[in-house]
Amino acid sequence: MTGKMPPRLNVLTLGVRDLPKVRAFYEALGWESLSEGEEFARFQTGGATLALYSLGLLAGEANMRPSEDSGSFGGFTCAVLVEEEGMVDEALETVRVACGRVLAEPVAREWGGRSGYFADPEDNVWELAWMPGATFDEWGGLIWP
Amino acid sequence: MTGKMPPRLNVLTLGVRDLPKVRAFYEALGWESLSEGEEFARFQTGGATLALYSLGLLAGEANMRPSEDSGSFGGFTCAVLVEEEGMVDEALETVRVACGRVLAEPVAREWGGRSGYFADPEDNVWELAWMPGATFDEWGGLIWP
């Protein structure tokens, strides 16, 4: 341990096949897209920045081989935390209006909160969650209870 | 657009097969693990919180089928931003000491910064990046230039 690696998760970049389609989905949630261009977009989000980038280019930069299997679980979930329990269901309603795929209806979780899941058009999975005692910084970043 | 879905990325949860092994890798980077238990861990990180959770349980919660293909690219990258250009190489040295797999040596990027890539023991991909003009909040969250 050298202490030269700051503990940070500043940007999550999703490799996407159809960038305009995926960007339009997040915009339909009411999220503001900040970048132009055919291959990259980012959103002004609290916590980490969400970015979208061409899957092939992203894999190429990282020297990884893109999966052939576009319909399966990528093995990760992103979470949006909300201030009140009822906002989970409200936000999931926003997802439905934006034609997002609801994967799991909100339920009480054993860790004391309430959450549901949805997927973007390329099966990136999001959890919508309320956590008792969670507060937020001025940008919407989570402060753990 | 109903405005009821706050633009936030508060937590990134990686579904992992061998939680103690993956947790030990991030601890070897100098990151502080905050939770106990066999199936969940989280790290005190600036920006979004990094969490680790059993892949099978995570997929089950989200009603997704875990991929059979454990060696391929998950289609996403996480980024750690650092304050100075030289810190990219220093941090990648920390990754090497922690036996992380360096995927791409740092190079100058066309967007004006410098970055390299590495993978954790289960092939979750991280970019280590310096971006001219980037600043940080008190917890290490990125403030875009």
Image (cartoon, coloured by chain):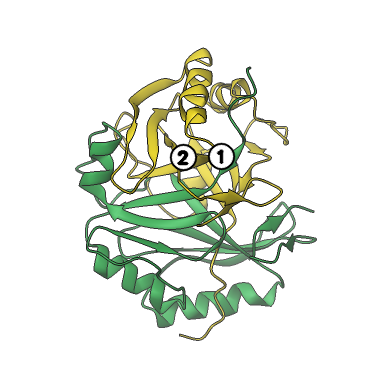
Chain colours: A green, B yellow
Residue at image mark 1? B83
Identified at 46% across, 73% down, the residue is A31
Residue at image mark 2? B130
Residue A22 image offset from top left, x and y in percent:
31, 66
Quadrant in which the N terminus of chain A appears: top right
Name the chain under label 1. B
Residue B57 image offset from top left, x and y in percent:
53, 43
Horizontal relation, residue B106 to residue B1: left or right: left
On screen, residue B12 above or below B23: below
Name the chain under label 2. B
Residue B71 image offset from top left, x and y in percent:
31, 28
**Picture quadrant of residue B67:** top left
Identified at 47% across, 78% down, the residue is A30
**Picture quadrant of residue A43:** bottom left
Identified at 34% across, 41% down, the residue is B74
Horizontal relation, residue B100 to residue A88: left or right: left
On screen, residue A138 above or below B107: below
- The amino acid at mark 1 is Glu
The answer to which of A97 and B83 lies nearer the viewer is B83
On screen, residue A140 above or below B64: below
Whether the residues at callouts 2 and 1 have beta carbons within 8 Å, the answer is yes
Identified at 62% across, 36% down, the residue is A7
